[in-house]
Structures are given as structure tokens and as C-alpha cells.
Image (spheres, rainbow, N blue to C red):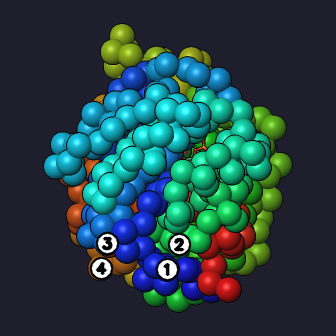
Amino acid sequence: MQNLTTLKDIDLENKKVLLRVDYNVVTDGKITDEFRVRASLPTIDYLIKKNCSIILISHNGRPEGKVVESMSLRPVARLLPRLLGRDVTFIDECTGDEVQQEAEFLRAGDIMLLENLRFNPGEEKNDSGFAKELASLAEVYVDDAFAAIHRAHASTVGVAKLLPHAAGLLVQKEYDTFEMLMEKPKRPYTAVIGGAKISDKLGILKEILNHVDALLIGGAMANTFLLAKGHNMRSSKVEKDKLKEALSIMRKAQTKKIKLLLPVDLVVSKSVDDKNKPKTVNTDGLQAGDIALDLGPKTMDLFNSVISESKTVFWNGTLGIAELPKFAKASSSMAHSMISSDAKTIVGGGDTAAFVDKAELESHFSFVSTGGGASLQLLAGNKLPGIEILLRK
Ligand code: ADP
Ligand code: 3PG
Ligand code: MG
């Protein structure tokens, strides 16, 4: 992997900096994940020490080019002053006269946060006019939005083409960690993949088999594999159009002699709410109406024994509906077995990182990535547009 252009490579003293961060943390007007916001602070502090003024830009959710009030970044503008100990001005637009004027008057140490970039249709289209408007606000562009680095959007790629640019401290740290995982992981190297976004992850699972010694699959993702193996998953979340892919991943693991483990027991219930008491069943024991919502204790014993023998572990995707404590047991057990092992432990994924952060375990891992799709794509060896543009020429 090549080196990135870093903050040390560009002239920052007294500059106006457009800082792309990933504050995709607001759902229905509430911040669900402070972790990503805290992860952006070291670069902000660094820039302030260089007497920069900072224009923070981010997307949130998928408003598809329209203003959706519940996806506004305003809640982050309220949180930032508490974390930074400084005022942060919020502008409810990201282009236009008011933004231009406010940007012009910024002085060293001033910080301004613009509204959700995706309220503008130009963002996701990587529209050159929109990129120009953003670029016109500043003298330098810094990308610290690791979680969005796999997106070729105006604020990730478009502006970088127009301004002197560098990776922020978070992007640099994330990139270095994944470089280590790709190029020199201590073996045995185990990947634990769970979560809900089955279609996002199946293709990547196939690639990960080129790097790991063991692959442990949990979450709703495992349901599709179990179904492909002939288990009746009843009312569990499955992706029937991905059965062939699941089979091909299992075949590839077999050919490459990689240990691929699926759940052997599951915690099931007839509904996610409290109306029904969850029970533990073997994977061939699901009854009509049962929904698999977490992994069972036998599975966790099996998974944890692989973790205890690993020297490197990467975990993406919670192993059950970990947002609800009663279905967070497998994820919690995985977190604890990782942190009590001798392995280098790396966690990736928005929900997984949020889970670890909420359980106050973050500092016990070697590294907790802020990226979900981005980290998986890097691990799959894909070239990511946001990274390519930041590579040192
Ligand atoms: P990340 O954001 O860490 O990449 P994902 O978004 O892929 O992870 O997966 C996390 C989501 O997966 C959580 O919202 C969780 O509720 C869901 N999930 C995990 N297990 C199950 C399951 N058995 N059934 C339905 N959803 C699940
Ligand atoms: C994420 O949370 O994974 C990133 O912010 C990217 O969001 P997106 O998948 O909507 O592009
Ligand atoms: Mg997620």
C-alpha cells in the first residue's frame, strides 16, 4: 500500500481549511454515536494549533438530495462545543451567499459546521459545480471522513481535485491499521463478520478469505448461510437471492482450507419486543414464527475458542440485535473474549463501534475503526476513491 499525503506534507499555518468529517451519527434528530464525533477531535485540535480556521463538512443519512429536517447536522453543532471547549457556528446550508460571507470572516481558531451535504443533489453525483462552490470556501482541503472514504462524492473526491489536500489524523491512523491487516497480520488471523447488511458484505467476505485463517459468521448474515446449508430459518431475516453466493463462499473456504464457522445455536423469539420470552435452540430446532435475534452460548464457546488462539482479530457487524441488551449477549461475549486475548484486536463498522463504545470497552481494543463499508472494502483490497486521491504522488 502506498503512503498518504499527511498534514505534515502541506502548508497549514494560518490557512482556511475545509475539513471533511463523517458525522453520519444523527437519526431522527438525535445523536446515536458520539464516537465518530470524538474521533474527529485530534485533527481539529491539530489545525487549531496551526492557527487555521475550520469549515467542517459532513453528510448524514441518505436524504437523496432533499432537505430532510430530521437528518440535519444541527445536533452535532450543539455537541461539538462541549467536546471542544470552543464555540462552533452552524449554518443551515452548505453553499450560497451566507456560507460564503461567514467563511470569509473566519479568523484563526474559528470553527463553522455546514448543513448536511446530501441535502444538495450535487454531493452524491460528485457534481463539479457543487465541488467548486465548496472548494471556493477554503484554501486547503483535509479529509478525515474515513467512514465515507469509499464514496466518490463532491466532498470526498471533487474538492480534493481543486485544493491542496491531505489526509487527516483519523484517516491516516485508519489507513495504517488496515495496511497492517492487509500486509502483515500476525497469524492466526481471524475475521468475525456479523450484522444486517448481508448484500453489502457477501462479496467482501469472499475476498477476505484470501487473507484470513478463520472466518466466524454471526448476526442476520449467518441466517442466509444456514438457510443455504438447508436449515429452516423460519421467520428470521434472510436474503434468499444470496444463497448461491453464500454457498460459493463456503466452497471457497473449504478449497482454501480456511476454518469457516457458523452458529450452532441461536437465541430466538416470536418478536423483538418484550411480549415473548426469548429461548435458545439449536440451528435445526427453530419452530414456526421463530426469529433468530442473537447467537447461543454453544456458538459463543466455539467462536471464543478460535479467538483465544488468534494473534489478530478483525470484527465487523454485531452478532445479534445488540441495540437491545437482551439480544446483545453474543456481541458482548465476543467483545470480552477479544479484549482478554493476546491478539491485536481491531473493530470496524458504525454499529459495532457504537456497541463497543457504549459498553465502555473501546480503550481495551487495539483499534476501533469508525468505518463500516469503508473498512470492509479496504480489507477486500479494493481501491477506494477517497484514498486514491490522497495518495502521495
Ligand atoms: P456495522 O454498522 O457495524 O457495519 P451492520 O450495520 O452491518 O454493522 O450490522 C449491525 C446491525 O445488524 C444492527 O442494527 C443489528 O441490529 C443488526 N443485526 C444483527 N443481528 C441481527 C439479526 N439476527 N437479525 C436482524 N438484525 C440483526
Ligand atoms: C457510514 O456510516 O457507513 C458512512 O457514513 C457512509 O454512509 P453511506 O453508506 O450512506 O454512504
Ligand atoms: Mg451499520
Residue visible at 38% across and 16% down in the picture? 273
Gap between marks 2 and 1, in whole Å? 7 Å
- Check if mark 2's residue and mark 1's residue have beta carbons within 8 Å: yes
The N terminus lies in quadrant: bottom right
Give me the residue at 55% from left, 80% from top.
5
393 horizontally vs 322: left or right? right
Q: Are marks 4 and 2 in contact (CB under 8 Å)?
A: no
Does dot 4 land on a helix, a strand or a loop? Answer: loop
Nearer to us in this view, 36 or 391: 391
User: Could you tell me residue 95's position as x and y percent?
Assistant: 58, 37
Check contact, mark 1 vs mark 4: CB within 8 A.
no
Task: Report the disc number at residue 166.
Answer: 2
Per the image, the residue denoted by label 1 is 10
Which residue is denoted by mark 4 in the rendering? 342
In 3D space, how far apart are the residues under numbered discs 3 and 4 (Cα atoms)? 39 Å
Q: Residue at x 60, y 59 (%)?
A: 149
How far apart in space, not on screen, are marks 1 and 4 (Cα)? Answer: 38 Å
Q: Circle 3 is placed at which residue position?
A: 50
Disc 2 under 8 Å from ligand 2? The reply is no
Secondary structure of residue under mark 2:
strand
- Picture layout, residue 324 above or below residue 376: above
Q: Residues within 10 Å of mark 1 (few under 14, many from 20)?
A: few
